[in-house]
Amino acid sequence: MLIKPPHKLGRLPLNMLAPNIITVFALCSGLTAIRFAIQEQWKFAVLAVALAALLDSLDGRVARLLKGSSRFGAELDSLSDFLCFGVAPGMVLYFWSLHTVGNGNTGWFVVLAFSTCTALRLARFNTALDDPNKPAWTGSYFTGIPSPAGAGMALLFMILSLEVDAAFLRSPWLNGLWALLIGGLMVSQVPTYSFKRVKVKRELVPLVLLGVGVVAALLLNEPWYTLFLLGAAYLATMPFSYLAYRKQRAKDAAVKDAVPADTMQADAPEAVAEPAPDASAPDASTPDASTGEQPPRLH
């Protein structure tokens, strides 16, 4: 009886590891936010969550750029998102404000509810990636608030309190109800804009770059006011995203009703020779020729 030798692990190229390294950095940043909260270093705790969100926005793009996407990286990214944007913000809020009400029990309920909403939101997003019947335009929208934005929204009053010394901003009831509202929006069916596919006209590029420079200058000089205003501006886009989504759905339904499927089948010839695949035509499994995007990593 022949015994096969054990399978030897081959070497992985660096481009396969770079996205996962960024994800691990994000994971460590989320954990460090909890440590800063325990030490009551609130500014560093908020910055650690913000850094985790920044790194989370980079790992998927680096994976697509270096063609290093993998199932392992997708699962690691999803687990990191749960800790950084589900557990860490809840714990930061708990140590900052929520522990002061109901012997901590009421505040801990908020932490559990917010973390559960984040886990459900991530699970729904991951399973939705496997749906082959989604219209292409749905990629321009998220269903509910994405988890990184949800983490920032949950800390919105805390961020403002770092600049404005007002007692009501630290109220456990205000922050608890606000965190529950944001958690509900994460698992809701409310469509929100996905800015990954936003295209800018060439004549507007200088204005966009100017706006980025202004925001960067504000972040360096007045970081907490700027972060609060960015969060408020994101919330203000939600009614517009809902209206745009409804309009697009209505337009898509009108096109389908105008050309019934049975009419198309009746007019079709009985036998049509299937043409040979064109090597120059884009395939569904390859990156989009216009955007260069590959199937996204799980979020």
Image (cartoon, rainbow, N blue to C red):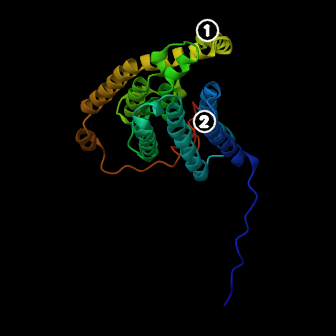
Residue at 38% from the left image edge and 43% from the top image edge: 133
Badge 2 amino acid: Ile
Q: Secondary structure at mark 1?
A: helix
Q: Which residue is mark 2?
A: 38
| Disc 2 residue crowd, few under 14, some 14–19, many 20+, Cα 10 Å | some
Q: Is residue 264 above or below residue 153?
A: below
Q: Quadrant of residue 54?
A: top right
- Give x and y (percent) for residue 19: 67, 42
Q: Position of residue 177 (x, y in %)?
A: 38, 27
Tag 2 and tag 1, C-beta contact below 8 Å:
no
Quadrant of residue 63 within the rendered picture = top right
* Residue 31 can be seen, yes or no: yes
The answer for how far apart the CA atoms under marks 2 and 1 are is 42 Å
Q: Nearer the viewer, residue 116 or 265?
A: 116
Residue at the image position 34 percent from the left and 20 percent from the top:
243
Give the residue type at disc 1.
Leu
Q: Position of residue 222 (x, y in %)?
A: 63, 12
Between residues 78 and 296, which one lies in front from this camera angle?
Answer: 78
Give the left or right position of residue 263, taking residue 218 as reference: left
Is residue 102 or residue 111 the one in the foreground? 102
| Front position in the image: 15 or 104 | 104
Check disc 1 and report the residue beneath it: 207
285 sits to left or right of 172: right
Q: Of helix, strand and loop, which one carries label 2? A: helix
Count of labels in the image? 2
Image location of residue 239, percent across then percent down: 37, 19
